[in-house]
Amino acid sequence: MKTIEWGFLIINYLFLGGLSAGLLFVSALATLIQKNAETDYTRIGRYGAMLAPWPVMLGCLLLVFDMGHWYRFYKLFLHFRWLSPMSIGSWLLMAFSSVSVVYFYSWLEAEQRERLFSLLPRRLRFLHFLNRDLTAWRRPLALFGLPLAISVGIYTGVLLGAVQSRPFWNTNLVAQMFLFSALSTGCAALILGLLWKSKELQAGEIRSLYLLDICFLFLEFFIVLPYVIHGQLSVQAVRDSLQLILGGPFTFVFWVFFLGCGLLLPLAIELWETVPALLSNATNHYGKQLAALSALLVLGGGFLLRYVFVFAGQMSSFK
Amino acid sequence: MAHKQKRYALLIDSRKCIDCKSCVVACRAENGVPLAYSRNWINEEHRGAWPKLQAAFEPEQCHHCTDPACVRVCPTGASRQRPDGIVVVDDADCVGCRYCIIACPYDARFFREDRGVVEKCDLCAHRVDRGEVPACVETCPSKARVFGDLNDANGKLRDVLAKRNYRVKKPEAGTGPQIYYLL
């Protein structure tokens, strides 16, 4: 009896988990490469740290409510099964969420911390000993968070790729595809965050994020391409499963909405905005509308990639 | 002679199957499976056109693989394989993530919405432990099913497998299925 077991809750969770991984990755990278003085990277580090913990926590909540017995989720932490991607993933998510929250806290200013602690009810006053300045922890936390972010980003793909009975997933390219898509959505969310909070775009910031995102989108594109080509040259079961995106129900969503609008179009916008300035060594004034558009497209593309893979994968099987 | 670990398996002679579905009903009755679900089922295939046509029936259920994908992916160990080869789900540890359903190449598992856990054929382990055969095997009127121990050199299973040609389904999935279909 073939059924579709994982639906929109799982798709959203995979997207949100990847988004947090991307945000923390970019923020940690910015923190690690910046010098002591305030530079272009400081705001990237701060905004990434501020945004990173929340999507993954919401995603975990969705994951828990997708279970048959949501209150039994603690059982995931009573076992460690190293051959089960989901078991590894639960522990990873736990570690990642914890680190991202402490990292978030380390980026709070003194007055922000005061405001946070003033919200505590009287009975929880004893928690005030936690009101400490963790600025010095930022770099060690970033160093620790970077591999965790990569692991969470890649794990969402491994969760699907490690299922041998679903030929649509079971290739060694899905994990990397999800990783670079996750990192790219992190860049896009940061661009949106910076746009939302600032009247003027700082050229240095936006250029760094564009360049990083261009790298991720190129990598993602050159993984999607061999995924399709190699799949077509593979055994019958894989070729059959690829029919889902080559004439089947997901063809339009995959090629037009995901690859066209969610990957190639934002890539073109970002190249259009950065390359001329790089070549002529002139300072460029980046357009707010274009930046917002490309970021939204990248986020939409990231979501659609997961939508297509979660559903198409479950529909594929050996004959 | 040293005591050998048992390895239970099922052998099905599809040509004897008449699609009466007694096995499905017996399984429901034995294991309390509601009508909305089935632990076993019968695949039907129709070939040719009138007057040259043929209908083939092939009973199927969990294959109790030697290297079960469902057991590997289970995050809590609720899906496990007993030493005698029977793959079971421990209700108490099942969180209902349904990863095993997706991982099974035979789509032999289902999610019980009412109980919030995953269920499947367990070869009537409770009966087997009492020395009986699974309900589907006992009830089959055309004797299409043979249940036995692969490690028993004098058993019926080994005897038939030695004399007849057989196949397993989807060996390319790499899980080592243990339902043998006679050709």
Image: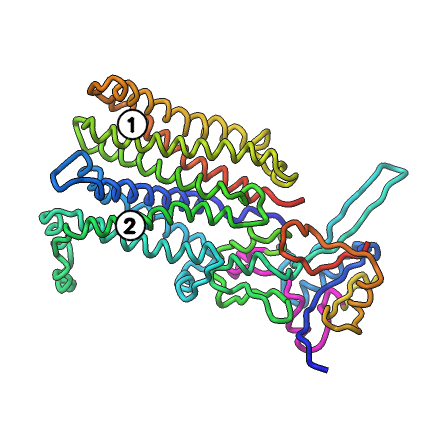
Residue linked to disc 2: A145
Dot 2 and dot 1 residues touching (CB under 8 Å): no
Highlighted magenta segment, given as a residue range: B110-137
Dot 2 surroundings within 10 Å: few (below 14), some, or many (20 or more)? many
Q: In this view, does A56 lie above or below B143?
A: above
- In the rendered image, residue A271, in percent from the top left (x then y), is placed at 33, 23
Q: Which amino acid does label 1 sit on?
A: Ala
Sequence-first tag of 2 and 1: 2
Residue A72: which disc?
none
Question: Residue B134: within the magenta?
Answer: yes
- In the rendered image, residue A303, in percent from the top left (x then y), is placed at 41, 37
Measuring 10% from the left and 49% from the top, which residue is drawn there? A110
Q: In this view, does A227 lie above or below A55?
A: above
* Near-viewer residue (B154 or B53): B154
Query: Residue A47 vs residue B33: left or right?
Result: left
* Near-viewer residue (A144 or B121): A144
- Callout 2: helix, strand or loop? helix
- Callout 1: helix, strand or loop? helix
Measuring 48% from the left and 33% from the top, which residue is drawn there? A224
Q: How many marks?
A: 2
Residue A292: which disc?
1
- In the rendered image, residue A59, in percent from the top left (x then y), is placed at 37, 48
Determine the CA span between mark 2 and mark 1. Answer: 27 Å
